[in-house]
Amino acid sequence: MFNLAKLADLARDHTAAGRKSLIKTLTDLFVSAGDDRDEQISLLFGDIVLKVLGQLEEETRIILSKRMCREKAAPHELMVRLAQDTIAVAEPALEHSPALTSEDLVAIASTASMEHLGAIAGRVSVDEAVTSVLVDRGDAKVLSKVAENQGAEFADAAFLKLVEKARSNVSIQAALIKRPDLPEEAAQALLPFLTEELKERITALGADNTLVQLLAERAATEVAARAQKLDEAREQSNALIRDVVSKKTKIDDAVTLFARADRTAELGMLLARVSGLPPGAVSQLLFSASDKPLIILCKANGVTSDAYKDILTMRARRLRIGGLELNAAIQRYAALSEEGARRSLETLKQAGSAFGLKTEVDTASEEKRSKKNIPFASSR
């Protein structure tokens, strides 16, 4: 049984030390009673403490908040007052007090400082009504903390707003990617501005994570899109080459397009088709040390000096050819007549592998000789 006379004496002592002793005695009495405390103790404690709370020094209020913050039966009004105090006093109450309701926390979060919001963001559980206020008002530190809190619940609208605020903040993004409850709409909004490092972290998460699934779907879509673009580009190139061969398009147009885009494979295919030579061999001639065969191929097929300069520029990038050497190459090209080039091309075709080329006839002959040399080839 507690001593009412002693409490009365302490209540009459208005000094700071007296108030501190009164609060300590009352708090000890309240906490030590535990679940066995009677209603009289609870009412007395709440009534007295609330009356003197405004007269207590901050140090005493901090001690009171720390000792009462985990008490389920703590007087509600007292805990609300403590939660609205300076952050040093309020922090224990805001982080831990089970006496504070969602409505209390919403009201406090709507007007309190960022430090108060940060304390609320660290509670073991934070319901949707409270997180919505935190997302509306919170700074980057508050938003990161509440996003990291796996006990915090978010409405879909709050998630979307949080993602929007995370657009330029990596710490919030890092917290969001770990949330298993991130809805698909918010995840889709988050993906475009994630760093490569964060995307790598996502891949380490479970396969049931929404972001993991979206990344996999996006990767598959991008691969398919790239493949489709390659197919379309290849078909466009083939169509252009066919048009050149059938004289529907000038060869200069195709040469300029391929050379300026550094599309060497397509350029080699073009010159091979119009010359009747194997593409592989012609592609090698594009960057061979001697430009004589290339000059013959281009001149014989009517490539003008202007278009040939585009080929030379492409060669210069690859072979590190200087200005003087380029001018000499241009002069060599201008010096050869188309008629002379056509005669040389026929000689080139006949020489075949002697010029580093293998025509289709050469290839067929080699295959025929190879079959004859098979010792146990079966006959049909």
Image (tube, grey):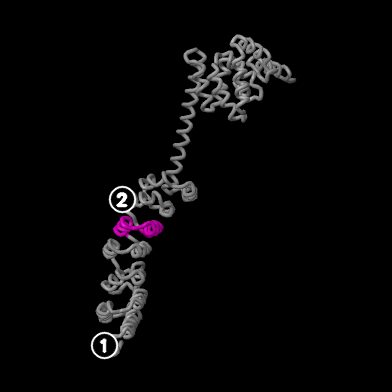
Please provide percent x and percent y for residue 23: 32, 81
313 and 233: which is toward the camera: 313
> Residue 235's mark?
none
Magenta stretch, main secondary structure, is helix
> Label 1 vs label 2: CA separation?
54 Å
Q: Residues within 10 Å of mark 1 (few under 14, many from 20)?
A: few
Q: Mark 2 falls on what kind of element? A: helix
- Residue drawn at (26%, 81%) of the image: 48
Residue on which the image places disc 1: 12
Please provide percent x and percent y for residue 115: 35, 64
Amino acid under label 2? Ala
Say whether residue 229 is magenta: no
Does the image show residue 374? yes
Q: Quadrant of the C terminus?
A: top right
Of marks 1 and 2, the one in the foreground: 1
Amino acid under label 1? Arg
Total marks in image? 2
Residue on which the image places disc 2: 157
Q: Is residue 311 above or below residue 89?
A: above
Please report the bounds of the magenta region as a residue range.
127-152
Question: Horizontal placement of 378 versus 301: left or right?
Answer: right
Please provide percent x and percent y for residue 310: 54, 23
Find residue 268 and report its image quarter: top right
Q: Residues within 10 Å of mark 2 (few under 14, many from 20)?
A: few
Q: Mark 1 falls on what kind of element? A: helix
127 and 132: which is toward the camera: 132
Question: Horizontal placement of 257 versus 377: left or right?
Answer: left
Question: Horizontal placement of 170 versus 157: left or right?
Answer: right
